[in-house]
């Protein structure tokens, strides 16, 4: 028996209207992926892979993943600029934007760091529950969060490029 999955990809990933895709997954559910460790949520990434027409070429998922790489690099540049300009609102927005895209692919560590940046940019603590009215402290926390964010992104990028034989 096969199960139907509906996956909604964020509008921002493609720069166009939201795309809904339905795919069929076997009861086994797995497509035989290598162990991605704690960098990539395997079940989330498998849902993207299930939409590929050809498991050897993987054109659909490859385009999403490599589009994300371009998007993330551009967003990091904007984050660096916004940090220099001390623009907390823009940093919060960029963190939110990249959080959604990274979550779609299952990049859990990247998503978690982006969520912290989103909260700090909104003058909140890392959980988003408590106000932090000190802009300098929030900017300092964002700067410190950018280091593991970029490291975790580079690790995930390396893993995914190996997966796609790039």
Image: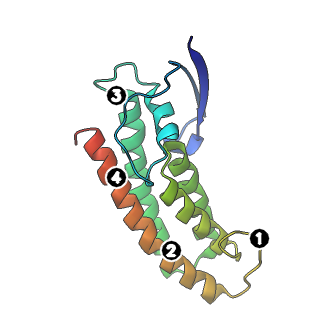
Quadrant in the rendering for residue 11: top right
Reply above or below: 25 against 79. above
Label of residue 129 in the image: 1
Question: Is residue 54 left or right of 44 when viewed as pictured?
Answer: left
Residue hosting label 4:
157
Residue hosting label 2:
145
Residue at point 70% right, 77% down? 123
Residue at point 60% right, 63% down? 115
Quadrant in the rendering for residue 10: top right
For marks 1 and 3, the one nearer the N-term is 3
For marks 1 and 4, the one nearer the N-term is 1
Q: Residue furthest left?
A: 166
For marks 2 and 1, the one nearer the N-term is 1
Residue hosting label 3:
58
Report the coloring of the rendering: rainbow
How many residues crowd mark 1 within 10 Å: few (<14), some (14–19), many (20+)?
Answer: few
Residue at point 43% right, 54% down? 39
Q: Residue furthest right?
A: 130
| CB-based contact (under 8 Å), mark 1 and mark 3 | no
From mark 2 to mark 1, how far is it between C-alphas? 18 Å
Label of residue 118 in the image: none
| CB-based contact (under 8 Å), mark 1 and mark 4 | no
From mark 2 to mark 3, how far is it between C-alphas? 33 Å
Residue at point 55% right, 37% down? 16
Question: Is residue 96 left or right of 55 when viewed as pictured?
Answer: right
Reply above or below: 95 against 108. below
């Amino acid at each position: 028996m096969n199960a139907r999955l509906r996956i909604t990809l964020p509008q921002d990933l493609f720069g166009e209207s939201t795309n809904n895709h339905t795919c069929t997954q076997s009861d086994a559910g797995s497509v035989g992926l290598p162990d991605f460790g704690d960098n990539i949520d395997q079940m989330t990434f498998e849902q993207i892979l299930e939409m590929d027409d050809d498991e050897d070429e993987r054109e659909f998922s490859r385009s999403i993943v490599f589009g994300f790489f371009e998007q993330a690099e551009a967003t990091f540049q904007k984050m660096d600029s916004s940090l220099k300009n001390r623009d907390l609102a823009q940093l919060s927005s960029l963190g939110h934007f990249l959080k959604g895209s990274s979550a779609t692919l299952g990049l859990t560590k990247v998503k978690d760091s982006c969520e912290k940046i989103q909260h700090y940019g909104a003058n909140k603590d890392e959980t988003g529950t408590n106000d932090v009215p000190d802009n300098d402290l929030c900017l300092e926390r964002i700067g410190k969060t950018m280091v593991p964010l970029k490291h975790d992104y580079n690790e995930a990028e390396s893993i995914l490029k190996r997966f796609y034989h790039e």
